[in-house]
Image (cartoon, grey):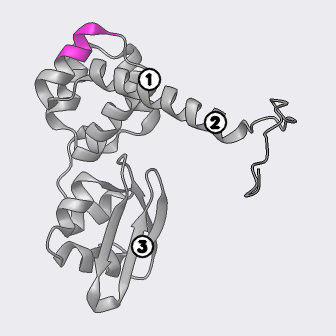
């Protein structure tokens, strides 16, 4: 049995923000991508009773202690325990069967990280790119093109923000004839 008073490490292992709400305790926790927070067993147990709470713990949050997962009935495959470095290593050096197993059995949060790192690295193994697209519908090549377009747009925007037109004097030297009522 897990210690009810002890605080346990809970990590958001997805590429997006995860929000946990436990209304009966008046708790709302917002996890940034990769952020680890401490939660008591009581909080985790009450979260598991919330609609979708157990799914949050199984797919997006990673509870570091196995005994807590066991007590709460959180389903986990081997890929549940993958961290960011292991995902990067899988993308760079992992075998095709290991990559396919990851896509077949990993929680959604891990697959989100696979997609993010496929762009950030970028993933260059064409077979893995094709497998990722076939299994998840995520097109790495199109995402890379979009990412490059975003970077170009951002650099243009930053350049125009920092550039100020040079202060110059008069560009022309014209003498306009002043028209008066009497002329």
The nearer-to-camera label among 3 and 1 is 1
Residue of label 1 = 148
Quarter of the image where the N terminus is located = bottom left
Compared across the picture, whether 150 is left or right of 171 comes to left
Task: Say which element carries label 1.
Answer: helix
Count neighbours of disc 1 (C-alpha within 10 A) and say few if under 14, some if 14 to 19, many if 20 or more: few
Q: Position of residue 162 (x, y in %)?
A: 71, 39
- Name the disc covering residue 139, or none: none
Over which residues does the magenta segment extend? 125-130
- Between 104 and 162, the one lying in front of the other is 162
State whether residue 163 is above or below residue 72.
Answer: above
Q: Is residue 93 left or right of residue 77?
A: right
Query: Between marks 3 and 1, how big is the CA–CA gap?
Result: 39 Å
Distance between the Cα atoms at labels 3 and 2? 46 Å
User: Where does label 3 land, which residue?
Assistant: 39
Label 2 Cα crowd, 10 Å radius (few <14 / some 14-19 / many 20+): few
Asked which quadrant contains residue 83, the reply is top left
Furthest-top residue in this view: 126
Task: Of the two numbered discs 2 and 1 on the same chain, state the one appearing first in sequence.
Answer: 1
- Residue to which mark 2 is pinned: 160
Residue 106 drawn at (x, y percent): 22, 39
- Of residue 9 and residue 161, the one placed in the foreground of this image is 161
Is residue 97 something that shows in the picture? yes
The number of numbered discs placed on residues in the rendered structure image is 3
Relative to 64, is 75 on the left or the right? left
Q: Residues within 10 Å of mark 3 (few under 14, many from 20)?
A: some
């Amino acid at each position: 049995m897990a210690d009810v008073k002890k605080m346990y490490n809970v990590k958001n292992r997805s590429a997006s923000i995860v929000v946990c709400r436990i209304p009966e305790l008046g708790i709302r926790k917002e996890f940034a991508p990769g952020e680890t927070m401490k939660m008591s067993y009581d909080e985790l147990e009450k979260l598991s009773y919330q609609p979708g709470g157990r799914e949050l713990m199984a797919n997006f949050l990673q509870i570091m202690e196995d005994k807590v997962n066991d007590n709460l009935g959180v389903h986990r495959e081997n890929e549940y325990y993958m961290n960011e470095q292991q995902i990067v290593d899988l993308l760079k050096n992992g075998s095709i069967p290991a990559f396919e197993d990851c896509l077949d059995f990993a929680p959604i949060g891990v697959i989100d990280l696979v997609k993010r790192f496929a762009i950030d690295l970028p993933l260059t193994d064409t077979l893995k790119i094709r497998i990722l697209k076939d299994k998840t519908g995520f097109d790495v090549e199109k995402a890379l093109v979009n990412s490059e377009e975003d970077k170009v747009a951002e650099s243009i925007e930053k350049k125009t923000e920092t550039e100020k037109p040079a202060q110059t004097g008069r560009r022309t030297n014209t003498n306009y004839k002043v028209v008066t009522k009497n002329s």
